[in-house]
Image (spheres, helix red, strand yellow):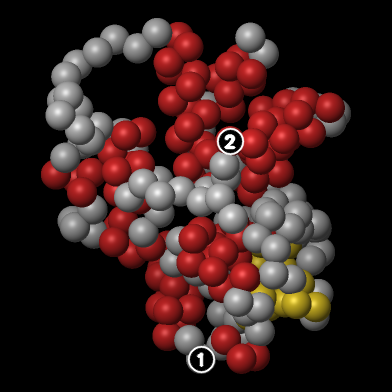
């Protein structure tokens, strides 16, 4: 299975923003981007003026890394979003947000999307009562997501849930922390989607 091999913190530094890839560490002063807010490498601190293409590329790379999606799959998501009705950019973000690993993360069952993916692959998540071990599974409105009984005692899930309650959950999902269960009220509108992603730049990149 293909996967990222670069250090997670290096990915954040390359994009110049926190991508929240390392759970609670990202919310502390130990996050490397706090002390080194420039790209990694020998020439990371050089100031360079980015072309329009480079800006579009960086936005696409940032979005891919946030959701942990590889290039081929990301391009497939874009093609599906382009063929669907409505705004291509919003359709793309909605598909990414509807991935099971992202929903599990949003519900606080994982401290990061990578933790959520691991939980799913280890049969730790039920969708409408059935085990689903595919992180890219697309959830639908009214789906019930539950931590499997055998995984409910894991300390990292309890820690992630406590942190999620403090930060709050998105309005498009309902979470019962005691039951370790959540319901997808509806798929997110643009106002519910990440404000720090400029999806129009991604559309412009792929439209060239």
Q: Residues within 10 Å of mark 1 (few under 14, many from 20)?
A: few
Dividing the picture into quadrants, the one containing residue 151 is: bottom right
Q: Residue at x 44, y 66 (%)?
A: 111
56 vs 99: above or below: above
On screen, residue 200 above or below 173: above
Q: Is residue 97 visible?
A: yes
Picture layout, residue 135 above or below residue 15 = below
Gap in Å between the C-alphas at discs 2 and 1?
35 Å
Q: Pinpoint residue 83: horizontal percent, then vertical percent.
A: 84, 27
Crowding at dot 2, Cα within 10 Å, few <14 / some 14-19 / many 20+, comes out as few
- In x, y percent, where is residue 197? 51, 33
Closer mark to the observer between disc 2 and disc 1: 2
Quadrant in the picture for residue 116 = bottom right
Helix, strand or loop at label 2? It is helix
Residue 186, horizontal then vertical, whole percent: 76, 54
Q: In this view, does 178 lie to the left or right of 35?
A: right
- Of the image marks 2 and 1, the number of the one nearer the N terminus: 2
State the residue in front, 102 or 119.
119
What label sits on residue 153 in the rendered view? 1
The answer to whether any part of residue 176 appears in the image is: no
Residue indicated by mark 2 = 71
Is 105 rendered above or below residue 197? below
Q: Position of residue 144 (x, y in %)?
A: 76, 72
Q: In which quarter of the image is the C terminus?
A: top right
């Amino acid at each position: 299975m293909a996967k990222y091999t670069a250090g997670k913190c290096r990915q954040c530094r390359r994009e110049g923003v926190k991508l929240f890839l390392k759970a609670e560490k990202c919310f502390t002063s130990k996050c490397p981007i706090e002390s080194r807010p420039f790209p990694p490498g020998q020439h990371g601190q050089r100031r360079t003026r980015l072309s329009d293409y480079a800006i579009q590329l960086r936005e696409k790379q940032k979005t891919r890394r946030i959701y942990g999606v590889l290039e081929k799959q990301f391009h497939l998501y874009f093609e599906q979003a382009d063929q669907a009705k409505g705004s291509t950019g919003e359709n793309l973000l909605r598909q990414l947000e509807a991935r099971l690993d992202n929903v599990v993360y949003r519900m606080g069952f994982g401290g990061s999307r990578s933790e959520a993916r691991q939980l799913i692959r280890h049969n730790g998540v039920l969708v409408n009562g059935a085990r689903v071990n595919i992180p890219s599974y697309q959830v639908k409105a009214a789906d019930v997501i539950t931590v499997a009984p055998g995984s409910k005692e894991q300390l990292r899930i309890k820690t992630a849930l406590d942190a999620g309650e403090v930060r709050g959950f998105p309005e498009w999902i309902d979470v019962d922390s005691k039951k370790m269960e959540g319901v997808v009220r509806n798929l997110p509108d643009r106002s519910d989607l990440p404000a720090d992603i400029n999806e129009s730049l991604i559309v412009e990149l792929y439209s060239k």
